[in-house]
Amino acid sequence: MSTEPYTANVRRLYHDVWNTGNLPVIDELFVSDAALDFLPPGLLTGTAGLKQFITMYRTTFPDIHFTIEDMIAEGKKVVTRWIATGTHVGSLMNIPPTGKPVSVHGISITHHDVSGKVVQSWSTFDQLGLLQQLGVIPTVG
């Protein structure tokens, strides 16, 4: 079976949801109770929590833009290496706006059901680098 439906949905996640803020698309791409390991404590779970998470980051970095650097798919899993850029103009987890531009690298793995919807997602990104770029944590050297 082709991996195209899965990679197409992931591309829509970054373009239509993250880059343009079209949150209703999330309901087309994810099952409502998707297991999302990257959601911070205190947010809802599933698609409701994902909408909160994306709204938080799009409020903090309204010009946020994700660029897909690599995408590898096998079976129903898609691995995406991405770079997110934006300007810190809103409060983020008690960090007041700095006006600083940031560039953060990350990797996400999504697992899809047979209909193509995401049922589970794991993500990691350079949180230390983000905090250093915001001036919250000093850089070494």
Image: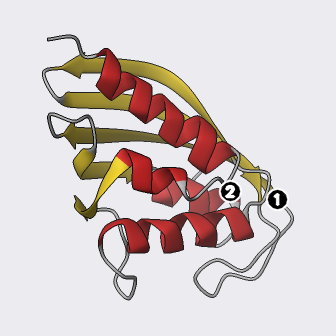
Quadrant of the rendered image containing residue 140: bottom right
Q: Residue 100: in sight, yes or no?
A: yes
Residue that numbered label 2 is attached to: 133
In this rendering, would 114 be left or right of 29? left
Give the farthest residue toward the top.
2
Residue 1 x/y as whole percent = 14, 11
Question: Which amino acid type is marked by label 2?
Answer: Gln
Find residue 50 and report its horizontal and vertical position in percent.
43, 65
Asked whether the viewer can see residue 139, the reply is no
Q: Where is residue 99 in the image (x, y as percent from the top left)?
A: 87, 65
- Residue position for label 1: 100
Q: Based on the displayed image, in which of its 4 quarters is residue 34 positioned?
A: bottom left
**Residue at the image position 58 percent from the left and 58 percent from the top:** 23
Q: How far apart are marks 2 and 1 (CA)?
A: 8 Å
Residue shown at 61% from the left, 41% from the top: 16
Mark earlier in primary sequence (2, 1): 1
Q: How crowded is mark 1: few (under 14 residues within 10 Å), some or many (20 or more)?
A: few
- Quadrant in the picture for residue 27: bottom left
Vertical placement of 66 versus 39: above or below?
Answer: above
Q: Name the residue located 12 percent from the left edge and 21 percent from the top edge.
A: 75
User: Which color scheme did the rendering employ for the protein?
Assistant: secondary structure
Q: Is mark 1 on a helix, strand or loop?
A: loop
Whether residues under marks 2 and 1 lie with C-beta atoms below 8 angstroms apart, the answer is yes
* Residue at image point 60% right, 48% down: 18
Residue 35 placement (x, y as % from top left): 21, 62
Q: Is mark 2 on a helix, strand or loop?
A: helix
